[in-house]
Image (cartoon, helix red, strand yellow):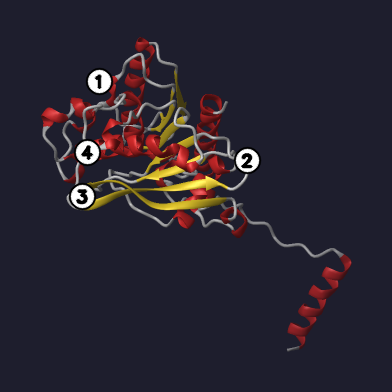
Amino acid sequence: MNRLFGAALALVMAFGTGTFAVAQGPVQAPADPGPPLSGYPRKALGAATPAELKTATYVRDVIYGHRDGMALTYDVFKPVKHANGALVVNMVSAGYRSSWGPPEERQPRYQALIDKGFTVVALYHASAPRFQVPDAVADVRLGMRHIKLHAADYGADPARIGVWGASAGGHLALVAGTMADDGNQTATNPVERSGNRIAAVVAYFPPTDMAALLQGRPKVDAIAFDDKLMASVSPLFSVDARDPPTLILQGDADRGVPPAQAQAMHAALDKAGVENQLKMYAGADHDFYVKGDPVRTDAYATDAMASMVSWFESHLKK
């Protein structure tokens, strides 16, 4: 007992004199939590702070169409201050699963855009496993018509709309850019009469040639569609000179969507004379993931988000 007391007294004295020292072991590297969802920085996947929640108001559950009797919807995030009149659509799709989330929970993913004054739309499509890639393509093309038709209702300029997405969402962002038109003026649905051309695209690690990407993969769920439709849902084969400025961000070690997909799209856009940029991240797998190096992974994800915001600032702001 006396020895315990004496040790405690010595510890207190050491603190008091400033001579207390803790033995230093090896510095532990941060644990690797695995790939970040859709290449988002870790901070963007956390909860919004009370202060952040005050920076946007929401227009919830806007119905833009129906599929199999179910509503197709999007949510709008409107900046409270310094709105710049431009609008960015996020294609909510991971593996063609378009999972709805309350705007309060999704807002951190869009905070970097909201802080710069962008109105943001989270666009949902009919989701896998029930629905397939051609359904998602048709849905987002319709959704873009509705958004452009109603952009002014959200305080945005329909001539200053950009689209952004990752992986399946990146594919759909490129669909929005390359498969746009001026609408069908003979359609009975007023939404179908609206054009859906946009002013800028950002795509993270996107599929661009579905036949090449899916060759040898099991045909299940979202990709279990007729091979004859492959070209019609592949942005690579819809590139033309009217396509909007496009930024593609890609890991050069991506095994899910190989870099060749992005490189082929970059070459096709170059050939068509479309302003575009391909930015590669060394050693990054899908979702900008660097196995065993969460610091580098998050640095890549953070840089990608900053690049995305900068691209839209350059091409959407007056």
For marks 1 and 2, the one nearer the N-term is 2
Label located before the other in sequence (3 or 1): 3
Question: Of label 4 and label 1, which has the lower sequence position?
Answer: 4
Point out which mark residue 133 bears: 4
Residue toward you, 145 or 288? 145
What kind of residue is marked 3?
Answer: Pro
Q: Nearer the viewer, residue 305 or 98?
A: 98
In terms of secondary structure, where does tag 4 sit?
helix
Left or right of 127? Residue 118 is right
Q: Secondary structure at mark 2?
A: loop
Q: Nearer the viewer, mark 2 or mark 4?
A: 2
Q: Position of residue 77 (x, y in %)?
A: 49, 47
Kind of residue at badge 1: Phe
Image quarter (top left, top right, bottom left or bottom right) of the N terminus: bottom right
Residue at the spot of label 1: 237
User: Viewed as shown, does residue 68 lie left or right of 181?
Assistant: left
Q: Element under label 3?
A: loop
Q: Which residue is mark 2?
A: 82
Disc 2 residue type?
His
